[in-house]
Image (tube, rainbow, N blue to C red):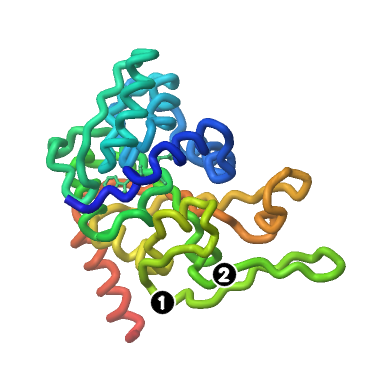
Amino acid sequence: MAQASYDEIADWYNESIRTNMLMHDLDFPPIFDLLGDVRGQRICDLACGQGVLSRLLVERGAEVVGVDLSAKMLEFARHAEEAEPLGIVYLQDDAHTLTTLDDASFDGVLCNFALTDIPDLKATFQSVKRILRPLGWFIFSITHPCFLTPLSGWLTEADGVIHRTVRGYFNEKFWQSDNPHGVRGKVGAYHRTLSTYINTLAEAGLLLERLIEPQTTRDRDVRKGYSEVPALFVAKCRHIANPDGVRHVRETNQLSTGS
Ligand SMILES: C[S@@+](CC[C@H](N)C(=O)[O-])C[C@H]1O[C@@H](n2cnc3c(N)ncnc32)[C@H](O)[C@@H]1O
């Protein structure tokens, strides 16, 4: 099993979610937009952390299994379940394999802010595909891979105009932010290009269906630059039965265009 780095920061992370978290503030609206009506659906909250989304899904009528690698994050989730029983089952498992979960046993899988914590994207998408029923959905949110690269930052001109500066986009690697107060300064992250995400999804048989890049409004009390470039990339994909079909279409297109 991969190492559970969140065990080290579970108290801090749980507290930062309870008090205020900019990224949750930004990504819950697009996530619930993409989810639509989840009543009666069986959903896996993959890398559920302390279970904040698991509980919101149950409130909307879903049956939820929350899975996380970190025993300490799961302790917070289970305490919340004990305090207010909602019927959520929490399991300790690794996204790469999901050995505790049966094939084709979920209508949907939601993975919020965790793919950049997970080393092997291909293995993770294959596990997601395996536990989804045919035509089941997969929704994930990540910090935007084009704008939040290891060498990105803000540049503010004298007149207040804000620019996002980006370097190192093509250098896929594990990195750690130099901000010791943020989650990426504490546990680091895997940077990957957008094409790696999209192509790995396609190869696993998860077809990209819809995408939201949320924009903040400048009057909100958040980083104003996120009204210029998106902080997040929120995607909805669909389990398709035959990924070879996608590959075949791609190859046929290449042959016909000669590229
Ligand atoms: C940034 S937190 C997000 C938690 C939760 N989804 C949320 O929105 O608050 C990332 C989570 O991914 C979990 N995680 C990291 N690697 C994992 C893996 N290989 N399998 C399962 N969970 C993993 C961590 O333990 C942590 O709880």
Q: CA distance from mark 1 to mark 2?
A: 12 Å
Is any atom of residue 153 visible in this view?
A: yes
Q: Residue at x 28, y 41 (%)?
A: 70
Assess whether mark 2 and mark 1 are in contact (beta carbons under 8 angstroms): no
Would the CB of label 1 be found within 8 Å of ligand 1? no
Ligand 1 located in image quadrant: top left
Percent across and percent down for residue 11 are: 42, 37
Q: Quadrant of the C terminus?
A: bottom left
Residues 191 and 78: in front is 78
Q: Residues within 10 Å of mark 1 (few under 14, many from 20)?
A: few
Q: Residue at x 49, y 54 (%)?
A: 233
Percent across and percent down for residue 149 are: 50, 68
Q: Secondary structure at mark 1?
A: loop
Instruction: Please state if 47 lies on the left or on the right of 178 as rendered.
Output: left
Percent across and percent down for residue 24 are: 53, 40
Residues 213 and 20: in front is 20
Name the disc covering residue 171, or none. Answer: 1
Look at label 2 and name its amino acid: Ser
Instruction: Please state if 126 lies on the left or on the right of 165 as rendered.
Output: left
Q: Residue at x 80, y 70 (%)?
A: 157
Q: Quadrant of residue 224?
A: bottom right
Name the disc covering residue 96, or none. Answer: none
Would the CB of label 2 be found within 8 Å of ligand 1? no
Instruction: Please state if 140 lies on the left or on the right of 229 as rendered.
Output: left
Name the disc covering residue 152, or none. Answer: 2
Percent across and percent down for residue 3 are: 24, 52
N-term-proximal mark, 1 vs 2: 2
Look at label 1 and name its amino acid: Asn
Is any atom of residue 139 visible in this view?
A: no
Q: 21 above or below 82?
A: below
